[in-house]
Image (spheres, rainbow, N blue to C red):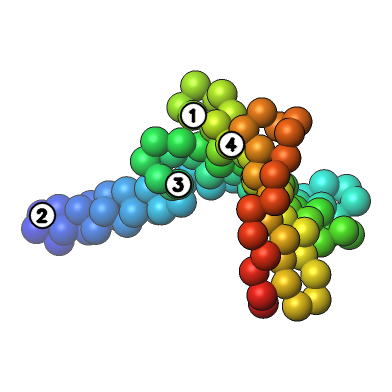
């Protein structure tokens, strides 16, 4: 009886760890090879959700930070080059501003 109780406890602990580890991070690949990732608020910063789109063909990344209701708070865009990355931001998704250049 003791072995059964210990075995059940181990199974439930393992099951709990599996369903809670990155349980809300979703990913996918489009037919053209581009990728997307989605992090909910539990995996991101505890408050906001994040949608990330990566264009493999053009080496660009787009990020939208969403509040818990799904309203966009800020957008980020990155252009990847051989030796650096240009980062842009927007609060409305229309008017963009240069943020910074990061060397790789």
Mark sitting earlier along the chain (2/3): 2
**Disc 4 crowd, CA 10 A, few/some/many (<14, 14-19, 20+):** some
Residue under the image location 49 percent in, 21 percent down: 69
Q: Nearer the viewer, residue 77 or 13?
A: 77
Instruction: Please give the residue where the numbered disc 2 appears in the rendered image.
Output: 1
Mark sitting earlier along the chain (2/4): 2
Q: Secondary structure at mark 3?
A: loop
Is residue 28 in view? Answer: no
- Disc 1 to disc 2: CB gap under 8 Å: no
Q: CA distance from mark 3 to mark 4?
A: 15 Å
The number of callouts visible is 4
| Callout in the foreground (1, 2) | 1
Instruction: Please give the residue where the numbered disc 4 appears in the rendered image.
Output: 74
Residue under the image location 58 percent in, 36 percent down: 74
Instruction: Please give the residue where the numbered disc 1 appears in the rendered image.
Output: 67
Q: Which mark is residue 44?
A: 3
Q: Nearer the viewer, residue 102 or 2?
A: 102
| Callout in the foreground (2, 3) | 3
Mark sitting earlier along the chain (1/3): 3
Q: Which mark is residue 83?
A: none
Mark sitting earlier along the chain (3/4): 3
| Callout in the foreground (1, 3) | 1
């Amino acid at each position: 009886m003791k072995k059964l109780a210990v075995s059940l406890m181990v199974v439930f602990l393992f099951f709990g760890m599996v369903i809670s580890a990155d349980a809300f991070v979703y990913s996918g690949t489009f037919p053209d090879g581009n990728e997307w990732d989605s992090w909910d608020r539990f995996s991101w910063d505890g408050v906001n959700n994040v949608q990330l789109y990566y264009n493999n063909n053009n080496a660009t990344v787009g990020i939208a930070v969403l509040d818990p209701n799904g309203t966009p708070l800020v957008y980020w865009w990155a252009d990847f080059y051989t030796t650096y990355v240009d980062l842009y931001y927007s609060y409305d998704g229309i008017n963009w501003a240069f943020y910074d250049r990061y060397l790789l």
